[in-house]
Image (tube, grey):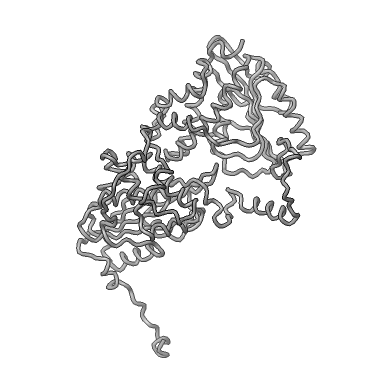
Amino acid sequence: MYLREQYRHIIAFNAKSDDIFEDVFKYPSLRKGYAQNENILSVPTFFYHIQGTFDDYEKKLLDFDEKLSKNRGYIKLYNFNHQIDNNFIEKFNQDWVDIKVADIPFIMKNLSNIFVSVCSDIVLRKIFIEKFEIMLTAYLKQQLNMSIAKNSIIKILFLSKKYYSELMNDYYIGEENPKIMCYGQIYRDDLYFLLLMFLCSIDIIYFNPTIQEKFPFPRDVVSYIQNVKYDRTSNVTNMFVKKNVEEKSDRQETVAYRATQEIRSILHDEQGGIYSNWQFENYIVNANTIKATYDEVLQLNSVDARFRQGFEVENGQIYIPNIFAKISGVNTDRYEYFNFFNSASQNALLIETVPFSVQRGYYKAPGLVSKDGLIDKERIKKLSEYKFKHLRESVQDYILDTIQDMINKKEALFKFCHDKDVDTDIIYEILMLERRYLDLLQNFDYPYKIPRIVIFHDNETPFTKNDGIRVGFFLLAGLDIVIFTPSGYNDVELVINEFNYDTHKLDTYDSNLRLKDKSKYVKVQKKGFWASLFGN
């Protein structure tokens, strides 16, 4: 009987093998631990992670692939394609719009429509939904940033749409379960997709000839995997890609050029930590804002993004661990306060006046944002207010993508998210950014020094809505933001939701302290005896 003909609750558990190349072809009913009744199907399932190489490695894998190809329900994945169909993105965004926290029952309920898109068969879809919830629970244990989670979940669902039904349609109970052979180095989202397929009782055999993975496998996933390591290693090859000699480029590579490219690919791998200048300028930026202690506000000012906890590069996206902090009040020792300020604001762009946005009248062009909340980039670029054409194309995309991100997350970001025309206000305010902010963005090479914006608020004037829009933009663009408010007055609290930033309260409040007073509290180092003697 085909699985799709009658629903069974599937329990996939990890099977062990002395020879995975042979045992994977055994019918599940012949594997140790197999059991079934009218309601439950308990299936010993292989999830093997084979690192390194062995004798006749390529020949053995090619023969293995050929043998697997004779099975019903088999796919080979040697290069995960993460390009997602626009229609799928729109459907997913409609389902995701109200999801703000890691509430798994709420997420599952909201994604009910997208599950239909993933699998049309009622029985197979029910199985998929059950296993997706298990996978999602494991994923959200290690990733509570819902912005990053959203990007991962849509990729996992789209991969499932591409492969799940194809794999499961021919699943014949007890005789043949589907199989995936994966080759190369995979990303985190790919791993969770493989976990999801395993939970559906699909055999997974993953070969990585390099041993080195792009990221540490999470413990919750490792518990499902049998790992086999060989001492020898080799680079990932294109052994499964059919080469068409007629399509060879007319431009011939020199030996030196080819060697240079190979060295570069090894040295400047996404996960290597050694990056060439502007290597990721065309990647999509995601702010992975971290909670930082008071001391870390200062300490992290000199730490590159790549060395901060939470930095990650994968799938054409880069995650910047920026900080957003308010220092409320002052130290009893004003010298200590301004010493901290000087260090925390070193090399930062300093904003000394609040409000720091300039109120301008402008005509609001219609149709810049669709009913689904998507901005029309080309229409925006044609506005007379669009002053970014001198910037690199990658920087223009960075700005426009951040505007889109702000609109997507306005309810989580802004206290004024329900104001009339707020989407249009966001667009126009960012189009008004002065040159000093644009220069900051133009010079931001993502893995390295994170630009920092420091605001010293020493008056009673509250932040305006436009100030809030700018702060939201700086945040989602991955910049560090530090606000010093010696009076302890409300400022950012009036425009930005509190869970987006950390507040560090100091000893006392001083509404009379001004930034210009800083010069009074600079400790002058006393001259030593010899310096005084020689007049130095």
Q: Nearer the viewer, residue 64 or 368?
A: 368
Give the tally of numbered discs.
0
The image shows residue 331 at horizontal and vertical percentages of 28, 62
Q: Quadrant of the N terminus?
A: top right
Vertical order, 346 against 115 (above or below): below
Picture coordinates of residue 510 (x, y %)? 21, 61
Residue 495 rendering spot, x and y as whole percentages: 27, 47
243 in relation to 273, above or below: above
Front residue of this view, candidates 53 and 418 = 418
Q: Position of residue 473 (x, y in %)?
A: 37, 49
- Where is the C terminus found, in terms of image quarters? bottom left
User: Residue 214 lies in what quarter of the image?
Assistant: top right
Is residue 176 found left or right of 89 in the rendered image? right
Most foreground residue, 102 or 365: 365
Q: Nearer the viewer, residue 170 or 17?
A: 170
Q: Specify whether 405 is left or right of 61.
A: left
Q: Residue at x 69, y 27 (%)?
A: 17
Q: Quadrant of residue 434?
A: bottom left
Looking at the image, residue 153 lies above or below residue 357:
above
- Note whether residue 459 is visible: yes
Which residue occupies 50% across, 26% down? 132
Q: Is residue 289 visible?
A: no
